[in-house]
C-alpha cells in the first residue's frame, strides 16, 4: 500500500517538476537549493507573467522544499547513459559525506562503485525501462544500509525521458524487524522447549491464548483444544479455584499457588503455578508457568515420614544407651547399700554391736538411697524433653531468668556469674523450659568445674547473640581448668562424668534438647584457659 | 552363721567413695585387713611393697587408668597377686574381657559381700598353698 503510494506520489512530483521545465536537459537543481528550484523561465514574459505561471512557480517551490526536506534519496537519470537529471538534498548529502560533490549529468556510481557493481547498478534502471515501475530492497555496498528503491519510468507523452528512483533508507526498520524475528524465535524456542508447562492466559476472561508442549503433556489437552477456552471449560479445575487463582494473580506481581488439576484422562495431579503479568502487543496477559509437583510432594511426605521414623529410632537407640548407663548409675548406690546392710548384719552378730559403726552404715545407706532416687529423678527430666512446646522466645531473657535461679547457689560457692546478652533480642522458636534447662545445666557444669579443687578465679560468663542465618548462639565460658585431654568427645554421652559427684546427665540432656531443636552443641577449651560450651538454635524452619 | 576371716588382706580400688566406704566397712567387720585406694594409680605406687598374700579387688570403670589396665600392670609386676574385677556395668563383653585378661574373678555390682569374701578366701588359700 504505502509503497505504491510512494511510487505514485513520486512520479507525480517528478513528472510535474520535469514536465514544466523548458530546459529539462540542463542543470536543474544542483545542490538542491530551494531558491534555485524557483523557475527563472518566465523572463521572456517580463512583468507580464501570468497568474497561472506565478502559481506554478510557487507550487514548484513548495515541491522542491518538500523533496529536499527528507533524508531519503530521490533522483532521476536519463535513459541512455544514466547520467543524473535530478537529485534531491538527501542524495547530495549522502555523497557529500563521502567526499563527492554531485552535479547534473554525473554518474556517481563511476566514482564510487567497483567496476563489477556498476553493471548491477545500471540493471536497476534497465529493468524499469524494460518492464516498468517496481520496488526492490537494495543493500548498499558497505552492507550497513538497506534502501527500499522505488523505481519509475518518466515519460513525456510516448517518449521515455528518464528513470526516477526514490531510495528510502529502511536500515533501522530492517534492523528492528530482524530483532523482533530473532526475539520471537528465541521466545518460541524457550516457550516450546521449556520443561515447565507454560500457558498464556487473558487477564480478564482466563481464556488460554497459547500453551507449550510441556503444558500439553501435563494436562493431556492438545494445544488446538485448549486455545480460546478457559481451564474451567477444560475441566482442569472448578470455577471457585479459578476465582481464587485469579485473585492471587491480581494481588501480587508474581504469585505462586499450588492447585490440583484434573487431566484430560481424569487423573489428578498436584501442580504449582507461578503467574506473572506480561505485555504482548499491548495486551496484558498472564504467563502461567506450572510444574507438576505430585511426585515431589509425595517424596517430601515420604521424607518427613522417614525422618520421623529415624527420629523415633534414634530415641530408641538413645533409650538403650540410657538404660545401660542407668543400670550402671543405679548399681553404684545399690552396691553401697548392699555392702552397708551386710556390714550391719555382721555388726549385729557381735556380742557387743558397735552402734556407732551401725549408725554410720545406716546413714550411708540413706545417702545411697537418695542418690539412687536422684538418678531416677534426673532420668525423668531427661525423658520429659519429648513433650515439647514451641513458641517464640527471647533466649537472652530466658538466660537472665536462669541467672536469677542460679544466683543463690553461685554466691554460696563464691562464683561470679556475668550475663552478657547482645542486642537485638535473641529470638527463636523453641521450648522455653528446655532452653532454660540447657543454660542451667551448662552453668551448673561450669560451677562444678570451678568449685571442685579449683584454686583459680571463679567466674562464669554467659553470652547470647543472634544472627539471621544461624539463629541464636549461647556461649557459657568458665575460668576453670577446662576439659581434660580425651574427654571432649565424650562429655555429651549420657552418664559420662569426670566429677566424683557428677551424674553425667547434664550435658547429655543438653545435647538431646539442642538436637531436638535441630541445633548444635559442642565443647572446647579456651586458649587462655577454662572451658567453653557453645550451643546454637537455628531460626525456625520456614516450611513448618 | 557368719565367719570372720582374720589375716585376709584386701586392696580395694574404686573411684566411687560411697561404694568404697561401704565395701571397706563390710570387709573390716568380716575381719579382713583392708586398704582402699581411689584410683589404680594410687595402688600402683604401693604395688611393690604389698605383701604376698593380698588380693586386689578393683572396679573396672574408673577415670584415668581403668581396672583392666591395673590388672595388666599387676600381672606384669606381681603376677602372684590375684585380681578380682567388679563393675556396675554388666555385659557379656565385659565378663569376657575380664576372663581373657586374666582376672581371678568378675563380680557384678551390687556385690554380695559374703560371696566376695568366700572368693577371696579361696583365692588366697590357693596362692598361700603355692608358697
Image (cartoon, coloured by chain):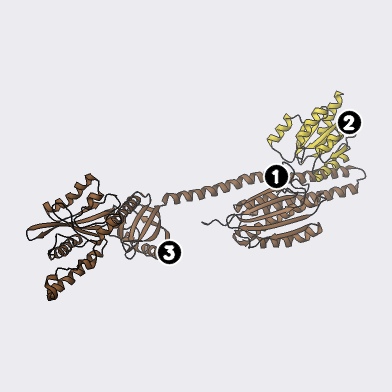
Chain colours: A brown, B yellow
Q: Who is closer to the viewer here, A224 or B15? A: A224
Q: Residue at x 67, y 63 (%)?
A: A397
Question: Which chain is disc 1 placed on?
Answer: A
Q: Are marks 2 and 3 on the same chain?
A: no
Mark in the foreground, 3 or 1: 3
Locate residue A192 relative to residue A149 in the image: left or right: right
Check disc 3 and report the residue beneath it.
A252
Tell me if residue A313 comes above or below residue A381 in the rendering.
above
Q: Quadrant of residue B13?
A: top right
Quote the CA–CA distance across marks 1 and 2.
40 Å
Check disc 2 and report the residue beneath it.
B51
Locate residue A195 relative to residue A61 in the image: left or right: right
Which label sits on residue A402?
Answer: none
Q: Give the class, few, some or many, for how many residues have Cα within 10 Å of label 1's Cα (few <14, many ≥20).
A: some
Q: Give the class, few, some or many, for how many residues have Cα within 10 Å of label 2's Cα (few <14, many ≥20).
A: few
Quote the CA–CA distance across marks 3 and 1.
53 Å
Residue A540 in sight here: yes
Q: Are marks 3 and 1 on the same chain?
A: yes
Check disc 1 and report the residue beneath it.
A488
Question: Which chain is disc 2 placed on?
Answer: B
Label 2 with label 3: CB-CB less than 8 Å = no
The x and y percentages for residue B15 are: 80, 42
Locate residue A55 relative to residue B76 in the image: left or right: left
Residue, far top: B130
Q: Who is closer to the viewer here, A221 or A340? A: A221
Of callouts 3 and 1, the N-terminal one: 3
Mark in the foreground, 2 or 3: 3
Quote the CA–CA distance across marks 2 and 3.
91 Å
Amino acid at each position: 500500500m504505502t509503497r505504491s503510494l510512494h511510487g505514485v506520489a513520486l512520479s507525480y512530483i517528478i513528472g510535474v517538476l520535469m514536465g514544466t521545465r523548458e530546459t529539462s536537459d540542463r542543470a536543474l537543481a544542483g545542490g538542491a537549493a530551494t531558491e534555485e528550484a524557483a523557475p527563472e523561465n518566465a523572463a521572456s514574459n517580463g512583468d507580464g507573467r501570468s497568474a497561472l505561471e506565478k502559481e506554478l512557480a510557487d507550487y514548484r517551490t513548495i515541491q522542491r522544499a518538500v523533496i529536499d526536506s527528507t533524508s531519503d534519496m530521490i533522483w532521476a537519470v536519463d535513459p541512455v547513459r544514466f547520467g543524473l537529471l535530478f537529485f534531491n538534498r538527501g542524495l547530495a548529502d549522502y555523497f557529500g559525506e563521502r567526499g563527492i560533490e554531485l552535479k547534473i549529468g554525473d554518474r556517481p556510481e563511476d566514482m564510487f562503485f567497483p567496476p563489477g557493481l556498476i553493471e548491477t547498478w545500471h540493471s536497476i534502471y534497465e529493468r524499469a525501462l524494460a518492464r516498468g515501475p517496481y520496488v526492490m530492497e537494495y543493500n548498499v555496498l558497505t552492507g550497513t544500509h538497506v534502501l527500499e528503491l522505488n523505481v519509475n519510468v518518466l515519460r513525456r507523452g510516448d517518449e521515455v525521458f528518464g528513470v526516477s528512483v526514490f531510495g528510502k533508507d529502511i536500515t533501522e526498520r530492517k534492523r528492528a524487524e530482524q530483532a523482533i524475528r530473532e526475539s520471537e524465535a528465541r521466545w518460541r524456542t524457550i516457550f516450546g522447549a521449556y520443561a515447565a508447562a507454560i500457558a498464556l492466559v487473558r487477564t480478564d476472561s482466563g481464556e488460554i491464548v497459547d500453551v507449550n508442549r510441556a503444558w500439553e503433556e501435563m494436562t493431556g489437552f492438545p494445544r488446538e483444544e485448549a486455545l480460546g477456552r478457559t481451564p474451567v471449560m477444560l475441566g482442569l479445575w472448578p470455577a471457585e479455584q479459578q476465582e481464587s487463582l485469579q485473585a492471587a494473580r491480581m494481588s501480587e506481581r508474581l504469585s505462586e499457588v499450588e492447585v490440583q488439576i484434573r487431566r484430560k484422562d481424569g487423573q489428578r495431579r498436584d501442580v504449582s503455578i507461578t503467574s506473572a503479568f506480561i505485555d504482548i502487543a499491548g495486551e496484558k496477559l498472564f504467563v502461567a508457568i506450572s510444574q507438576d509437583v505430585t511426585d515431589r510432594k509425595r517424596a517430601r511426605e515420604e521424607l518427613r515420614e522417614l525422618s520421623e521414623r529415624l527420629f523415633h529410632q534414634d530415641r530408641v537407640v538413645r533409650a538403650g544407651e540410657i538404660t545401660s548407663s542407668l543400670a550402671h548409675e543405679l548399681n553404684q548406690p545399690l552396691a553401697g547399700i548392699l555392702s552397708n546392710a551386710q556390714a550391719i548384719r555382721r555388726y549385729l552378730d557381735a556380742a557387743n554391736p558397735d552402734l556407732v559403726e551401725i549408725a554410720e552404715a545406716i546413714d550411708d545407706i540413706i545417702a545411697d538411697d537418695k542418690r539412687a532416687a536422684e538418678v531416677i529423678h534426673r532420668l525423668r527430666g531427661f525423658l520429659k524433653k519429648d513433650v515439647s512446646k514451641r513458641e517464640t522466645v527471647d533466649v537472652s531473657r530466658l538466660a537472665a531468668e536462669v541467672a536469677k535461679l542460679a544466683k543463690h547457689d553461685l554466691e554460696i560457692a563464691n562464683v561470679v556469674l556475668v550475663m552478657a546478652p547482645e542486642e537485638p533480642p535473641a529470638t527463636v522458636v523453641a521450648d522455653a523450659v528446655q532452653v532454660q534447662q540447657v543454660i542451667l545445666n551448662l552453668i551448673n557444669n561450669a560451677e562444678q568445674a570451678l568449685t571442685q579443687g579449683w584454686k583459680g578465679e571463679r567466674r562464669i560468663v554467659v553470652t547470647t547473640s543472634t544472627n539471621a542465618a544461624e539463629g541464636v548462639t549461647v556461649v557459657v565460658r568458665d575460668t576453670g581448668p577446662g576439659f581434660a585431654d580425651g574427654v571432649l568427645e565424650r562429655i555429651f554421652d549420657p552418664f559420662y562424668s569426670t566429677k566424683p559427684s557428677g551424674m553425667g546427665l547434664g550435658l547429655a540432656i543438653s545435647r538431646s534438647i539442642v538436637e531436638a531443636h535441630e541445633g548444635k552443641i559442642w565443647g572446647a577449651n579456651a586458649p587462655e584457659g577454662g572451658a567453653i560450651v557453645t550451643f546454637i538454635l537455628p531460626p525456625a524452619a520456614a516450611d513448618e | 552363721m557368719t565367719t570372720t576371716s582374720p589375716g585376709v588382706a584386701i586392696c580395694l580400688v574404686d573411684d566411687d567413695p560411697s561404694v568404697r566406704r561401704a565395701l571397706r566397712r563390710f570387709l573390716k567387720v568380716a575381719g579382713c585387713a583392708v586398704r582402699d585406694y581411689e584410683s589404680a594409680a594410687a595402688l600402683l605406687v604401693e604395688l611393690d611393697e604389698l605383701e604376698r598374700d593380698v588380693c586386689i579387688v578393683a572396679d573396672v570403670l574408673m577415670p584415668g587408668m581403668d581396672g583392666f589396665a591395673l590388672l595388666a600392670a599387676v600381672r606384669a609386676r606381681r603376677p602372684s597377686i590375684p585380681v578380682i574385677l567388679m563393675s556396675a556395668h554388666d555385659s557379656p563383653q565385659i565378663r569376657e574381657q575380664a576372663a581373657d585378661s586374666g582376672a581371678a574373678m568378675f563380680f557384678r555390682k551390687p556385690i554380695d559381700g559374703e560371696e566376695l569374701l568366700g572368693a577371696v578366701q579361696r583365692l588366697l588359700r590357693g596362692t598361700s598353698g603355692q608358697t
